Image: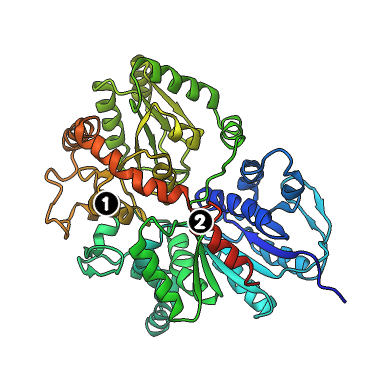
Amino acid sequence: MTAPPYKHLVVFSTHFWGHSRPMCTLVARIVKLRPILVTFLTVHSVHSRAVAEVARDFQPGEEHLLSRIRVVALDEGTEADETSGAPGAFKAAYDRLCNGQPLICAKTGTRFEALPVRPNAVLLDSFAVDAHDIVRETSGDAVKLYTWYPVSTNSFFHYFSEDKYPQAEAEATRTGRPVLDVAYEMMWRVGGALMHSPCLPTTHDYEMHPQGFRFPKPLAANVIFRIAGAINKADALITFDAADYQPQATDAVRQHFAEKSRKAYYAGPLMPSGAQAKEKEKINSENGGEIMAFLDEKLKSAGEHSVLYLSFGSLFWPPDPAKLWAVLDVLMEKNIPFVMSHGASMASPLPDDVKARIEKYGNAIVSDWVPQQALLEHPATGWYLMHGGHNGTLESITAGVPMIVWPIDADQPMNAIYLADDINVAYELIEVRGGCGLGKIFRNGRTPRAVGTIDAVKEEMRGVLDQAFGPDGAEKRARLQGLRMKLQAAWDEDGVARGEVSTFLDGF
Protein backbone atom coordinates (compact mmCIF):
# COMPACT_ATOMS: atom_id res chain seq x y z
CA MET A 1 0.00 0.00 0.00
CA THR A 2 1.56 3.31 -1.10
CA ALA A 3 1.58 6.41 1.04
CA PRO A 4 -0.85 9.18 0.01
CA PRO A 5 0.77 11.70 -2.36
CA TYR A 6 -0.16 14.66 -0.16
CA LYS A 7 0.07 15.64 3.46
CA HIS A 8 -2.90 17.46 5.01
CA LEU A 9 -2.35 20.55 7.15
CA VAL A 10 -5.26 22.10 9.07
CA VAL A 11 -4.84 25.80 9.88
CA PHE A 12 -7.07 27.90 12.09
CA SER A 13 -6.96 31.69 12.38
CA THR A 14 -8.90 33.82 14.85
CA HIS A 15 -11.00 36.88 14.10
CA PHE A 16 -7.94 39.13 14.62
CA TRP A 17 -6.94 40.23 11.11
CA GLY A 18 -3.41 41.08 12.20
CA HIS A 19 -2.99 37.42 13.16
CA SER A 20 -4.70 36.04 10.07
CA ARG A 21 -3.14 38.17 7.33
CA PRO A 22 0.39 36.74 7.52
CA MET A 23 -1.06 33.26 7.97
CA CYS A 24 -2.71 33.69 4.55
CA THR A 25 0.69 34.29 2.95
CA LEU A 26 2.21 31.39 4.88
CA VAL A 27 -0.28 28.85 3.54
CA ALA A 28 0.31 30.16 0.01
CA ARG A 29 4.05 29.60 0.44
CA ILE A 30 3.49 26.16 1.96
CA VAL A 31 1.70 24.71 -1.06
CA LYS A 32 4.44 26.08 -3.30
CA LEU A 33 7.14 24.35 -1.26
CA ARG A 34 5.64 20.89 -0.71
CA PRO A 35 2.79 18.62 -1.92
CA ILE A 36 0.46 19.62 0.90
CA LEU A 37 -3.29 20.16 1.06
CA VAL A 38 -4.42 22.92 3.40
CA THR A 39 -7.78 23.24 5.11
CA PHE A 40 -7.79 26.86 6.25
CA LEU A 41 -10.47 27.28 8.90
CA THR A 42 -11.46 30.81 9.78
CA VAL A 43 -14.55 32.75 10.89
CA HIS A 44 -17.25 34.80 9.14
CA SER A 45 -15.65 38.20 9.62
CA VAL A 46 -12.30 37.11 8.19
CA HIS A 47 -13.35 34.66 5.47
CA SER A 48 -13.72 36.95 2.43
CA ARG A 49 -10.57 38.89 3.19
CA ALA A 50 -8.65 35.67 3.82
CA VAL A 51 -9.68 34.28 0.41
CA ALA A 52 -8.51 37.49 -1.27
CA GLU A 53 -5.27 37.68 0.73
CA VAL A 54 -4.28 34.08 -0.01
CA ALA A 55 -4.76 34.72 -3.75
CA ARG A 56 -2.42 37.72 -3.70
CA ASP A 57 0.68 35.54 -3.46
CA PHE A 58 -0.09 33.50 -6.58
CA GLN A 59 0.87 34.34 -10.15
CA PRO A 60 -0.83 33.38 -13.43
CA GLY A 61 -0.15 29.72 -14.09
CA GLU A 62 -0.14 28.80 -10.40
CA GLU A 63 -3.88 28.13 -10.19
CA HIS A 64 -3.20 24.42 -9.61
CA LEU A 65 -1.28 25.33 -6.46
CA LEU A 66 -3.95 27.73 -5.21
CA SER A 67 -6.51 24.93 -5.60
CA ARG A 68 -4.74 23.00 -2.84
CA ILE A 69 -6.02 25.54 -0.29
CA ARG A 70 -9.65 25.53 0.76
CA VAL A 71 -10.80 28.37 3.02
CA VAL A 72 -13.74 27.34 5.16
CA ALA A 73 -15.61 29.65 7.53
CA LEU A 74 -16.87 28.43 10.88
CA ASP A 75 -19.70 29.98 12.84
CA GLU A 76 -18.32 32.94 14.76
CA GLY A 77 -18.68 33.50 18.47
CA THR A 78 -20.15 36.72 19.83
CA GLU A 79 -18.13 37.01 23.06
CA ALA A 80 -14.62 38.45 23.42
CA ASP A 81 -13.17 35.16 24.66
CA GLU A 82 -14.61 33.01 21.86
CA THR A 83 -11.38 32.92 19.87
CA SER A 84 -11.96 29.38 18.55
CA GLY A 85 -15.17 30.33 16.75
CA ALA A 86 -18.64 29.86 18.16
CA PRO A 87 -18.83 27.33 21.01
CA GLY A 88 -18.42 23.86 19.52
CA ALA A 89 -17.74 25.10 15.98
CA PHE A 90 -14.06 24.20 15.83
CA LYS A 91 -14.58 20.83 17.49
CA ALA A 92 -17.36 19.91 15.05
CA ALA A 93 -15.22 20.85 12.06
CA TYR A 94 -12.12 19.08 13.36
CA ASP A 95 -14.10 15.91 14.14
CA ARG A 96 -15.42 15.87 10.57
CA LEU A 97 -11.92 16.28 9.16
CA CYS A 98 -10.60 13.43 11.30
CA ASN A 99 -13.51 11.18 10.30
CA GLY A 100 -13.33 11.86 6.58
CA GLN A 101 -16.58 13.82 6.38
CA PRO A 102 -17.36 16.90 4.25
CA LEU A 103 -17.35 20.46 5.55
CA ILE A 104 -19.86 23.21 4.84
CA CYS A 105 -18.60 26.80 4.77
CA ALA A 106 -20.73 28.77 7.23
CA LYS A 107 -20.19 31.96 5.19
CA THR A 108 -20.86 30.81 1.61
CA GLY A 109 -22.66 27.48 2.04
CA THR A 110 -20.05 25.79 -0.19
CA ARG A 111 -19.68 22.06 0.43
CA PHE A 112 -16.10 20.79 0.64
CA GLU A 113 -15.81 17.05 0.18
CA ALA A 114 -13.50 15.00 2.37
CA LEU A 115 -9.88 15.02 1.31
CA PRO A 116 -8.15 11.73 0.48
CA VAL A 117 -5.88 12.05 3.50
CA ARG A 118 -6.70 12.80 7.15
CA PRO A 119 -4.94 15.65 8.95
CA ASN A 120 -1.24 15.11 9.59
CA ALA A 121 -0.69 18.40 11.41
CA VAL A 122 -2.61 21.35 12.82
CA LEU A 123 -1.41 24.96 13.06
CA LEU A 124 -3.48 27.03 15.50
CA ASP A 125 -3.36 30.70 16.39
CA SER A 126 -1.99 30.76 19.94
CA PHE A 127 -5.03 32.85 20.90
CA ALA A 128 -7.28 29.90 19.98
CA VAL A 129 -6.59 28.31 23.36
CA ASP A 130 -9.67 26.06 23.39
CA ALA A 131 -8.78 24.68 19.96
CA HIS A 132 -5.40 23.52 21.32
CA ASP A 133 -7.23 21.48 23.96
CA ILE A 134 -9.61 20.04 21.38
CA VAL A 135 -6.84 18.84 19.06
CA ARG A 136 -4.94 17.19 21.90
CA GLU A 137 -8.07 15.57 23.33
CA THR A 138 -9.17 14.31 19.91
CA SER A 139 -5.87 13.27 18.32
CA GLY A 140 -3.39 12.92 21.17
CA ASP A 141 0.13 12.77 19.77
CA ALA A 142 -0.97 11.17 16.49
CA VAL A 143 -1.29 14.59 14.85
CA LYS A 144 1.44 17.19 15.13
CA LEU A 145 0.22 20.34 16.87
CA TYR A 146 1.89 23.68 16.14
CA THR A 147 1.05 27.04 17.66
CA TRP A 148 1.10 30.27 15.62
CA TYR A 149 2.80 33.13 17.45
CA PRO A 150 1.34 36.27 15.81
CA VAL A 151 3.38 38.95 17.58
CA SER A 152 7.02 39.92 17.90
CA THR A 153 9.02 37.26 19.72
CA ASN A 154 10.77 39.92 21.80
CA SER A 155 7.52 39.83 23.83
CA PHE A 156 7.72 36.12 24.59
CA PHE A 157 9.60 36.24 27.88
CA HIS A 158 7.46 39.06 29.24
CA TYR A 159 4.17 37.33 28.55
CA PHE A 160 4.23 33.67 27.60
CA SER A 161 7.36 31.84 28.74
CA GLU A 162 5.69 30.77 32.01
CA ASP A 163 2.20 29.32 32.43
CA LYS A 164 0.73 31.16 35.41
CA TYR A 165 -2.83 29.86 35.01
CA PRO A 166 -2.31 27.04 37.57
CA GLN A 167 -1.33 29.72 40.10
CA ALA A 168 -4.57 31.55 39.38
CA GLU A 169 -6.58 28.34 39.79
CA ALA A 170 -4.86 27.58 43.10
CA GLU A 171 -5.51 31.10 44.39
CA ALA A 172 -9.15 30.90 43.28
CA THR A 173 -9.55 27.61 45.15
CA ARG A 174 -7.90 29.01 48.25
CA THR A 175 -9.99 32.18 48.37
CA GLY A 176 -13.24 31.00 46.82
CA ARG A 177 -13.05 33.75 44.21
CA PRO A 178 -13.77 33.20 40.50
CA VAL A 179 -10.63 32.18 38.62
CA LEU A 180 -11.53 34.76 35.96
CA ASP A 181 -11.16 37.57 38.51
CA VAL A 182 -7.92 36.20 39.96
CA ALA A 183 -6.34 35.72 36.53
CA TYR A 184 -7.37 39.22 35.45
CA GLU A 185 -5.80 40.76 38.55
CA MET A 186 -2.59 38.79 38.06
CA MET A 187 -2.35 39.87 34.43
CA TRP A 188 -2.74 43.60 35.13
CA ARG A 189 -0.84 43.81 38.41
CA VAL A 190 1.46 46.82 37.96
CA GLY A 191 3.23 48.13 41.02
CA GLY A 192 6.52 49.31 39.62
CA ALA A 193 8.30 45.96 39.79
CA LEU A 194 11.33 45.61 37.54
CA MET A 195 11.01 43.19 34.65
CA HIS A 196 14.04 41.48 33.16
CA SER A 197 14.19 39.89 29.73
CA PRO A 198 17.01 38.50 27.58
CA CYS A 199 15.55 40.49 24.69
CA LEU A 200 15.20 44.02 26.06
CA PRO A 201 16.45 46.50 28.65
CA THR A 202 15.08 46.27 32.17
CA THR A 203 11.71 48.00 32.52
CA HIS A 204 9.09 48.69 35.16
CA ASP A 205 6.02 46.49 34.78
CA TYR A 206 3.83 49.52 34.02
CA GLU A 207 6.01 50.45 31.04
CA MET A 208 4.46 47.54 29.16
CA HIS A 209 1.12 49.42 29.34
CA PRO A 210 2.08 52.96 28.23
CA GLN A 211 -1.52 53.98 27.58
CA GLY A 212 -3.02 52.41 30.69
CA PHE A 213 -4.99 50.24 28.27
CA ARG A 214 -6.69 47.02 29.39
CA PHE A 215 -8.20 44.26 27.29
CA PRO A 216 -11.74 43.18 28.22
CA LYS A 217 -11.71 40.83 31.20
CA PRO A 218 -12.94 37.70 29.33
CA LEU A 219 -10.34 38.12 26.56
CA ALA A 220 -7.55 38.90 29.02
CA ALA A 221 -8.25 36.20 31.61
CA ASN A 222 -9.84 33.43 29.53
CA VAL A 223 -7.58 33.76 26.50
CA ILE A 224 -4.39 35.83 26.82
CA PHE A 225 -3.60 34.54 30.32
CA ARG A 226 -3.94 30.95 29.04
CA ILE A 227 -1.73 31.30 25.95
CA ALA A 228 1.41 30.08 27.72
CA GLY A 229 -0.42 26.86 28.56
CA ALA A 230 -1.58 26.47 24.97
CA ILE A 231 1.98 26.95 23.73
CA ASN A 232 3.13 24.24 26.15
CA LYS A 233 0.71 21.79 24.52
CA ALA A 234 2.23 22.31 21.07
CA ASP A 235 5.05 20.37 19.45
CA ALA A 236 6.64 23.60 18.19
CA LEU A 237 6.05 27.30 17.75
CA ILE A 238 5.82 29.04 14.37
CA THR A 239 5.97 32.83 14.20
CA PHE A 240 5.56 35.40 11.47
CA ASP A 241 8.43 37.27 13.10
CA ALA A 242 11.65 37.54 11.10
CA ALA A 243 14.76 35.86 12.50
CA ASP A 244 16.89 38.86 11.53
CA TYR A 245 14.58 41.48 13.05
CA GLN A 246 16.01 41.14 16.55
CA PRO A 247 18.66 38.39 16.55
CA GLN A 248 19.05 38.53 20.34
CA ALA A 249 15.37 37.67 20.81
CA THR A 250 15.55 35.00 18.10
CA ASP A 251 18.46 33.25 19.81
CA ALA A 252 16.85 33.46 23.25
CA VAL A 253 13.51 32.05 22.08
CA ARG A 254 15.16 29.23 20.13
CA GLN A 255 17.23 28.33 23.19
CA HIS A 256 14.13 28.34 25.40
CA PHE A 257 12.38 25.83 23.16
CA ALA A 258 15.51 23.73 22.65
CA GLU A 259 15.71 23.25 26.42
CA LYS A 260 12.26 21.66 26.17
CA SER A 261 13.28 19.55 23.13
CA ARG A 262 11.07 21.62 20.89
CA LYS A 263 11.65 24.17 18.15
CA ALA A 264 10.67 27.72 17.24
CA TYR A 265 10.40 28.39 13.50
CA TYR A 266 10.73 31.91 12.08
CA ALA A 267 8.58 32.27 8.94
CA GLY A 268 8.64 36.03 8.46
CA PRO A 269 8.38 38.50 7.06
CA LEU A 270 5.24 37.28 5.32
CA MET A 271 4.00 39.76 2.72
CA PRO A 272 2.56 38.70 -0.64
CA SER A 273 5.04 39.05 -3.48
CA GLY A 274 5.02 38.99 -7.25
CA ALA A 275 3.67 41.13 -10.05
CA GLN A 276 0.02 40.87 -9.00
CA ALA A 277 0.37 41.26 -5.23
CA LYS A 278 0.08 45.05 -5.04
CA GLU A 279 -2.51 45.32 -7.81
CA LYS A 280 -4.78 42.84 -6.04
CA GLU A 281 -4.25 44.72 -2.78
CA LYS A 282 -5.43 47.97 -4.38
CA ILE A 283 -8.53 46.25 -5.73
CA ASN A 284 -9.33 44.77 -2.31
CA SER A 285 -8.84 48.06 -0.44
CA GLU A 286 -11.39 50.81 -0.05
CA ASN A 287 -10.29 53.94 -1.95
CA GLY A 288 -7.19 52.10 -3.16
CA GLY A 289 -7.09 53.90 -6.49
CA GLU A 290 -7.70 57.31 -4.91
CA ILE A 291 -4.94 56.77 -2.34
CA MET A 292 -2.38 55.71 -4.93
CA ALA A 293 -3.33 58.69 -7.13
CA PHE A 294 -2.85 60.96 -4.09
CA LEU A 295 0.65 59.51 -3.55
CA ASP A 296 1.51 59.92 -7.23
CA GLU A 297 0.49 63.57 -7.12
CA LYS A 298 2.46 64.21 -3.90
CA LEU A 299 5.52 62.61 -5.44
CA LYS A 300 5.32 65.19 -8.24
CA SER A 301 4.43 68.20 -6.12
CA ALA A 302 6.29 67.55 -2.85
CA GLY A 303 8.88 64.95 -3.76
CA GLU A 304 10.06 61.65 -2.35
CA HIS A 305 9.38 60.79 1.31
CA SER A 306 6.99 63.73 1.71
CA VAL A 307 3.88 61.85 2.90
CA LEU A 308 3.20 60.52 6.39
CA TYR A 309 1.11 57.39 6.79
CA LEU A 310 -0.85 56.99 10.02
CA SER A 311 -2.39 53.71 11.17
CA PHE A 312 -2.95 51.82 14.40
CA GLY A 313 -3.63 48.52 12.65
CA SER A 314 -6.86 46.56 12.51
CA LEU A 315 -7.59 46.48 16.26
CA PHE A 316 -5.96 49.14 18.45
CA TRP A 317 -6.66 52.84 18.86
CA PRO A 318 -5.41 55.48 21.33
CA PRO A 319 -7.57 55.36 24.47
CA ASP A 320 -7.55 59.17 24.57
CA PRO A 321 -8.52 60.16 20.99
CA ALA A 322 -8.08 63.87 21.79
CA LYS A 323 -4.33 63.28 21.63
CA LEU A 324 -4.67 61.86 18.13
CA TRP A 325 -6.75 64.83 16.97
CA ALA A 326 -3.98 67.05 18.39
CA VAL A 327 -1.39 65.18 16.32
CA LEU A 328 -3.51 65.67 13.19
CA ASP A 329 -3.63 69.39 13.95
CA VAL A 330 0.18 69.48 14.05
CA LEU A 331 0.44 67.65 10.74
CA MET A 332 -1.89 70.17 9.15
CA GLU A 333 -0.12 73.08 10.84
CA LYS A 334 3.15 71.90 9.26
CA ASN A 335 1.47 71.22 5.90
CA ILE A 336 2.56 67.59 5.87
CA PRO A 337 0.42 65.49 3.53
CA PHE A 338 -0.90 62.35 5.21
CA VAL A 339 -2.97 59.22 4.69
CA MET A 340 -4.78 57.88 7.76
CA SER A 341 -6.29 54.44 8.14
CA HIS A 342 -9.45 54.57 10.24
CA GLY A 343 -10.46 50.90 10.03
CA ALA A 344 -9.39 49.64 13.47
CA SER A 345 -12.17 47.86 15.34
CA MET A 346 -11.51 50.04 18.41
CA ALA A 347 -11.32 53.27 16.40
CA SER A 348 -13.16 56.31 17.70
CA PRO A 349 -15.40 58.14 15.21
CA LEU A 350 -13.92 61.28 13.75
CA PRO A 351 -15.60 64.26 15.44
CA ASP A 352 -17.37 66.62 13.06
CA ASP A 353 -14.95 69.46 13.80
CA VAL A 354 -11.94 67.22 13.03
CA LYS A 355 -13.57 66.10 9.78
CA ALA A 356 -14.17 69.72 8.86
CA ARG A 357 -10.55 70.69 9.54
CA ILE A 358 -9.24 67.81 7.41
CA GLU A 359 -11.60 68.64 4.56
CA LYS A 360 -10.56 72.29 4.69
CA TYR A 361 -6.91 71.26 4.77
CA GLY A 362 -7.34 69.28 1.55
CA ASN A 363 -3.95 67.60 1.79
CA ALA A 364 -4.96 64.32 3.37
CA ILE A 365 -7.01 61.16 2.87
CA VAL A 366 -8.80 59.26 5.63
CA SER A 367 -10.00 55.76 4.72
CA ASP A 368 -11.27 52.75 6.61
CA TRP A 369 -8.84 50.46 4.81
CA VAL A 370 -5.80 51.27 2.73
CA PRO A 371 -3.51 49.26 0.41
CA GLN A 372 -0.82 49.31 3.08
CA GLN A 373 1.89 47.31 1.31
CA ALA A 374 1.60 49.37 -1.87
CA LEU A 375 1.42 52.61 0.13
CA LEU A 376 4.56 51.86 2.15
CA GLU A 377 6.49 50.90 -0.98
CA HIS A 378 5.50 54.10 -2.81
CA PRO A 379 8.42 56.58 -3.10
CA ALA A 380 6.24 59.44 -1.82
CA THR A 381 5.80 57.74 1.56
CA GLY A 382 8.32 59.06 4.04
CA TRP A 383 7.21 58.11 7.55
CA TYR A 384 4.84 55.67 9.20
CA LEU A 385 3.18 56.86 12.44
CA MET A 386 2.04 53.60 13.96
CA HIS A 387 1.41 51.70 17.17
CA GLY A 388 4.27 49.24 16.82
CA GLY A 389 2.19 46.18 15.93
CA HIS A 390 4.46 43.62 14.36
CA ASN A 391 2.74 43.27 10.99
CA GLY A 392 3.15 46.98 10.35
CA THR A 393 6.65 47.00 11.80
CA LEU A 394 7.91 44.28 9.45
CA GLU A 395 6.10 45.79 6.47
CA SER A 396 7.60 49.21 7.19
CA ILE A 397 11.12 47.84 7.57
CA THR A 398 10.80 45.76 4.41
CA ALA A 399 9.68 48.88 2.53
CA GLY A 400 12.53 50.93 4.03
CA VAL A 401 10.18 53.41 5.74
CA PRO A 402 11.26 54.64 9.22
CA MET A 403 8.67 54.93 11.95
CA ILE A 404 7.19 57.20 14.61
CA VAL A 405 5.87 54.79 17.24
CA TRP A 406 2.87 55.39 19.53
CA PRO A 407 2.71 52.08 21.45
CA ILE A 408 -0.48 51.04 23.17
CA ASP A 409 0.01 47.52 24.56
CA ALA A 410 0.93 43.89 23.76
CA ASP A 411 4.29 43.66 21.91
CA GLN A 412 4.14 47.30 20.83
CA PRO A 413 6.08 48.86 23.77
CA MET A 414 8.87 46.33 23.19
CA ASN A 415 9.04 47.10 19.49
CA ALA A 416 9.13 50.82 20.30
CA ILE A 417 12.11 50.36 22.64
CA TYR A 418 13.98 48.23 20.14
CA LEU A 419 13.32 50.44 17.12
CA ALA A 420 13.88 53.79 18.79
CA ASP A 421 16.58 53.04 21.37
CA ASP A 422 18.41 49.88 20.35
CA ILE A 423 18.75 50.27 16.58
CA ASN A 424 17.76 53.96 16.22
CA VAL A 425 15.50 53.72 13.16
CA ALA A 426 12.40 55.27 14.77
CA TYR A 427 11.10 57.86 17.21
CA GLU A 428 8.95 56.85 20.17
CA LEU A 429 6.27 59.29 21.30
CA ILE A 430 6.35 59.73 25.08
CA GLU A 431 3.96 62.60 25.86
CA VAL A 432 1.01 60.63 24.43
CA ARG A 433 1.19 58.24 27.38
CA GLY A 434 -1.62 57.95 29.89
CA GLY A 435 -2.71 56.11 33.04
CA CYS A 436 0.02 53.97 34.58
CA GLY A 437 2.15 54.73 31.51
CA LEU A 438 2.90 58.18 32.91
CA GLY A 439 5.44 56.72 35.34
CA LYS A 440 9.20 57.07 35.09
CA ILE A 441 10.96 55.18 32.28
CA PHE A 442 13.62 52.98 33.85
CA ARG A 443 16.10 52.88 30.98
CA ASN A 444 16.54 56.65 30.75
CA GLY A 445 14.94 58.09 33.89
CA ARG A 446 12.55 60.22 31.84
CA THR A 447 9.00 60.94 32.97
CA PRO A 448 6.39 62.50 30.67
CA ARG A 449 6.97 66.06 31.77
CA ALA A 450 3.47 67.45 31.43
CA VAL A 451 1.52 64.37 32.49
CA GLY A 452 0.11 63.74 29.06
CA THR A 453 -1.48 67.11 28.33
CA ILE A 454 -2.59 68.08 24.82
CA ASP A 455 -0.08 70.93 24.75
CA ALA A 456 2.74 68.53 25.61
CA VAL A 457 1.60 66.14 22.88
CA LYS A 458 1.62 68.92 20.30
CA GLU A 459 5.00 70.25 21.36
CA GLU A 460 6.59 66.80 21.22
CA MET A 461 5.02 66.05 17.86
CA ARG A 462 6.35 69.29 16.38
CA GLY A 463 9.83 68.41 17.54
CA VAL A 464 9.65 64.84 16.25
CA LEU A 465 8.40 65.97 12.83
CA ASP A 466 11.16 68.58 12.57
CA GLN A 467 13.70 65.84 13.21
CA ALA A 468 11.99 63.25 11.01
CA PHE A 469 11.89 65.52 7.96
CA GLY A 470 15.42 66.80 8.61
CA PRO A 471 18.96 65.38 8.74
CA ASP A 472 18.29 63.15 11.78
CA GLY A 473 15.39 61.47 10.02
CA ALA A 474 17.51 60.97 6.92
CA GLU A 475 20.11 59.22 9.04
CA LYS A 476 17.46 56.92 10.50
CA ARG A 477 16.21 56.10 7.00
CA ALA A 478 19.74 55.27 5.85
CA ARG A 479 20.39 53.18 8.96
CA LEU A 480 17.23 51.16 8.32
CA GLN A 481 18.36 49.95 4.90
CA GLY A 482 20.73 47.27 6.20
CA LEU A 483 17.94 45.58 8.16
CA ARG A 484 15.62 46.06 5.21
CA MET A 485 17.95 44.08 2.95
CA LYS A 486 18.18 41.23 5.45
CA LEU A 487 14.41 40.96 5.77
CA GLN A 488 13.86 41.19 2.03
CA ALA A 489 16.19 38.19 1.57
CA ALA A 490 14.36 35.96 4.07
CA TRP A 491 12.34 34.19 1.35
CA ASP A 492 15.11 33.97 -1.24
CA GLU A 493 16.13 30.50 -2.40
CA ASP A 494 18.62 30.23 0.47
CA GLY A 495 16.78 32.62 2.82
CA VAL A 496 16.30 31.93 6.49
CA ALA A 497 12.47 31.98 6.46
CA ARG A 498 12.26 29.68 3.45
CA GLY A 499 14.62 27.25 5.16
CA GLU A 500 12.74 27.39 8.46
CA VAL A 501 9.37 26.72 6.86
CA SER A 502 10.84 23.90 4.75
CA THR A 503 12.21 22.26 7.89
CA PHE A 504 8.85 22.64 9.61
CA LEU A 505 7.05 21.00 6.67
CA ASP A 506 9.46 18.08 6.63
CA GLY A 507 8.70 17.43 10.29
CA PHE A 508 5.20 16.02 9.92
Residue at the image point whose x is 71% and y is 66% from the top: 94
Residue 90 seen from this side? yes
295 relative to 105 in the view: left or right: left
The first of marks 1 and 2 along the sequence is 1
Which of the 4 quarters of the picture holds residue 340? top left
Q: Which residue is mark 2?
A: 495
Q: Quadrant of the C terminus?
A: bottom right
Q: Looking at the image, do the residues carrying marks 1 and 2 touch, with CB atoms under 8 Å apart?
A: no
Residue 184 seen from this side? no
Question: Mark 1 packing: few (<14 Cα in 10 Å), some, or many (20+)?
Answer: some
Residue at the image point whose x is 66% and y is 69% from the top: 121
Q: Which residue is mark 1?
A: 423
492 in relation to 287, above or below? below
276 in relation to 12, above or below? above
Q: Quadrant of the N terminus?
A: bottom right
Taking depth in this image into account, of 506 and 339 the one nearest to the observer is 506
134 relative to 395 in the view: left or right: right
